[in-house]
Image: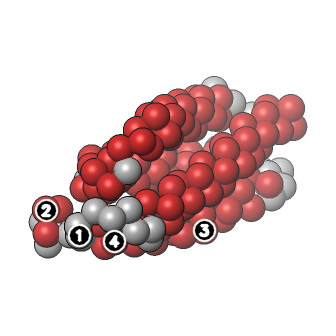
Amino acid sequence: MSDDAKTPRTVASMVEHDHEVLHRSMHELARLIAAPVPSDGFADWKLDLLWRLRDFQNHLQKHFDLEEESSYKSELLRLAPHVSGQLDHLEDEHRRFIRDLSSVLDYLKDMHRSDSTNIQAVRAGFAAIVLGLEEHEGAERTLIQDVFYQDYGVGD
């Protein structure tokens, strides 16, 4: 189905479904990061975590692309032009989340041994991203409900 053929509610449903998938992924990653680092096998642990974080970052970027480049955004603006500032703020947050996740990845890449201080910094950095993403998703969910599921008197 082409993007043009998708209804606003279909795209909103896709975004909401993706929120659920990302939510599960980030909490799985948070559990992995919080678990004790193996006393031996640090290099394997680090590589596994790097790859999982990169996969998550890629999925997150694709999710942001869906929100920013699909009919989702244009339809939100068509139905409720007054939310443009809110959309700009959410898109700024998208870029910040990707930068913050890149920083965590860079920090992890620079670790060459299991060091509790460095591992705690990685944990704290990812925990801040999780908290921010949860707040961000809540704001998006509210926006979707306010715009797509309210009658603004505009023809569908």
| Badge 2: residue crowd in 10 Å (few <14, some 14–19, many ≥20) | few
Question: Is the Cβ of the residue at disc 2 closer than 8 Å to that at disc 4?
Answer: no
Disc 1 is placed on an element classified as loop
C-beta proximity under 8 Å, tags 2 and 3: no
Q: Which mark is first along the chain, 1 or 3?
A: 3
Q: Residue at x 80, y 54 (%)?
A: 34
Circle 3 sits in a helix, a strand or a loop, which is it?
Answer: helix
Q: Residue at x 60, y 64 (%)?
A: 23
> Which residue type does callout 3 highlight?
Arg
Residue position marked by numbered label 2 in the rendering: 4
- Residue beneath label 4, please? 9
Q: Secondary structure at mark 2?
A: helix
Which is nearer the N-term, disc 3 or disc 4? 4
Q: CA distance from mark 2 to mark 4?
A: 13 Å
Q: Is residue 88 above or below residue 22?
A: above
Left or right for 33, reference 70: right
Please state, as top left, top right, bottom left or bottom right, where the N terminus lies in the image.
Answer: bottom left
Disc 1 residue type (three-letter): Asp
Q: Are discs 3 and 1 less than 8 Å apart at CB?
A: no
Which residue is identified by label 3? 24
Q: Is residue 13 above or below residue 19?
A: below
Query: Which mark is in front, 3 or 4?
Result: 4
The nearer-to-camera label among 2 and 3 is: 2
